[in-house]
Amino acid sequence: MSRSAHPAGPRHADVLPEGHYAAPPADLNRLDAHIWSRTVTRNADGAVEVGGIDVRDLAAEFGTPAYVLDEADFRARCRAWRAAFGPDADVFYAGKAFLSRAVVRWLHEEGLNLDVCSGAELAVALDAGMPAERIAMHGNNKSNAEIDRAVAAGVGRIVLDSFQEIVRVAAAAERHGRRQPVQIRVTVGVEAHTHEFIATAHEDQKFGLALAGGQAAEAVRRVLKLESLELIGIHSHIGSQIFDMAGFEVAARRVVSLLAAIRDEHGVQLPEIDLGGGLGIAYTADDDPAEPYQIAKSLGEIVSRECEAARLDPPRLSVEPGRAIVGPTAFTLYEVGTVKPLEGLRTYVSVDGGMSDNIRTALYDAEYTVALASRRSDAEPMLSRVVGKHCESGDIVVKDAFLPADLAPGDLLAVPATGAYCRSMASNYNHVPRPPVVVVADGKPRVIVRRETEEDLLRLDVG
C-alpha cells in the first residue's frame, strides 16, 4: 500500500489486512507503569488520578484539553540522570522538549544544565535564574542578535554549526571582550534507526560539519586560530527516540578519532565531548527504553574504550536528555465530543483537541496509547482511532487503540507520554487556542503555562 500517492498526504484511513491489529489488552483499565508518570493510578471510583488529584477535578477547574505534568516525577528523573552520570560528567536538559520558567527553576534546583537553541529559549532560561555558565546555545542558523545575546550573557558554551558561525561568534566575543567557550558540532555519518525527519547524523542534512570531506577538521583549524574563541570540545548528535546504543558506539569512535587527529596535528587535547541526546521513552507497551544508569554505564565504557585505543585521556562527557526527562512526566487530558462507529472498520472517537496540541502523530507517524480516564469500564473493547477537531483528515491523536465499547460524549480520555514536544510544537491551527500546562505537586495543582484565549489571538491580529 502506497503512503505517498495521495495528494492530501498519508492515507491514514486505508483498510489494512485482517489480523493487522494486535489483540486487545486483557484489562482496558490497567495503566502501564512504564508509560505513565510515577504517581498516576486509578482511585476507588475508577478515575485516573495523578499526585492524588482526580482528573475529573482537574478538568472541572482547568478545562480540557490540558497538559498535566507531574512535578515529582520530573524532579525524580532529573535526579536519576544526575546521579547516573556523576560529578565527572554534565547533563544538559534539552529545552526544546518543553521549556518554561518553572522547568528552568526545577533544573537549577536539581543540578542539571540547560541546552537552548533560540534567543527566546535563552531569554526564558535567564529570566528564570539559570546561571549563564550552565547554558549551552545550539542552533544551525543563529542570528547575529542571538549570538550577541548569548556571548553578552556569558553562556558556558556555544555549539558552532557552520564556518560562517565561527566568524560571527568570534566577532561577538571580541566586541564583548570575552573568550567564548565553543564546541564544534560534527556529523559523524551515523544514522539512528528512527523516522527520517528526526535522524540527524547522516551527511545529507542541515546540522553540523561533516567528518567526511574534512569540514570538521577545517573548522577546528579555523577556531584554534582565533584568540576570542576557546575550543573546549566536539559535539555529536545522532537522532531521536533511540533505544539501541550501537549508534552511539560508532559515533563515539569517530569523534574520538577526530580528537586524536586534533592532538596529532595541533598538539591540543580537547577536554570535552558531547554525545547529544535522543534517548527514547516508552510511548506504547512495545517500547523498552534503558534506565539512565544503564545509559551512563554504556556511554562511559564506550568513550573510555575508544580513548584507550587512541591513547587519549578520557574527556569530560556531556549528554542532552530532553524527551527522556519530561516526556513520561505528562499526559494530555481530553473530553470526548463524538463517537462514530464505522461498521467492520473501527470507531472514530473525536476529542476537543488534536493536531494543534499534538502534531507528532501527523508529522512523524508517532504512536501513542490512550485510556478512559474519568471512570472504570468493564465493557467490551472496541478498535478505535482517537482524532481531533481540526479540519484535516490526518488530524489523528492515537491511530489505533482499544477503548471500552460504552465510551460516550463527555468521557475524559488521557494520552500519556506527551510531556515532550507536544506543547513546544503546538499551534493555533483553525484558530484554536493552545492548552494550559497544569502541574501537580504535593497534592495541589497549579498552572505554569496558562491557556490561550481568543483575546490573545485577536491581540496579535493588528491588521
Image (tube, grey):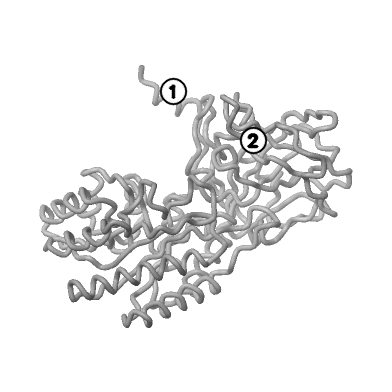
Mark 1 crowd level (few <14, some 14–19, many ≥20, 10 Å Cα) = few
Q: Amino acid at mark 2?
A: Ile
Rendered residue at 55%/73% (across/down): 294
User: Is residue 235 positioned above or below 148 on the image?
Assistant: below
Quadrant of image for the C terminus: top left
The kind of residue on which mark 1 rests is Leu
Q: Position of residue 449 (x, y in %)?
A: 49, 44
Q: Nearer the viewer, residue 197 or 153?
A: 197
Q: Secondary structure at mark 1?
A: helix
Residue 458: x and y in percent read 44, 23
Q: Position of residue 256 (x, y in %)?
A: 35, 72
Q: CA distance from mark 2 to mark 1?
A: 27 Å
> Residue shown at 64%/31% (left/top)?
11
Q: Position of residue 145 (x, y in %)?
A: 22, 43
Mark 2 or mark 1: name the one nearer the start of the chain. 2
Residue marked by disc 2: 396
Q: Residue at the spot x=60%, y=54% of the render? A: 444
Q: Which residue is mark 1?
A: 458
Q: Which mark is residue 32?
A: none
- Quadrant of the snapshot with the N terminus: top right
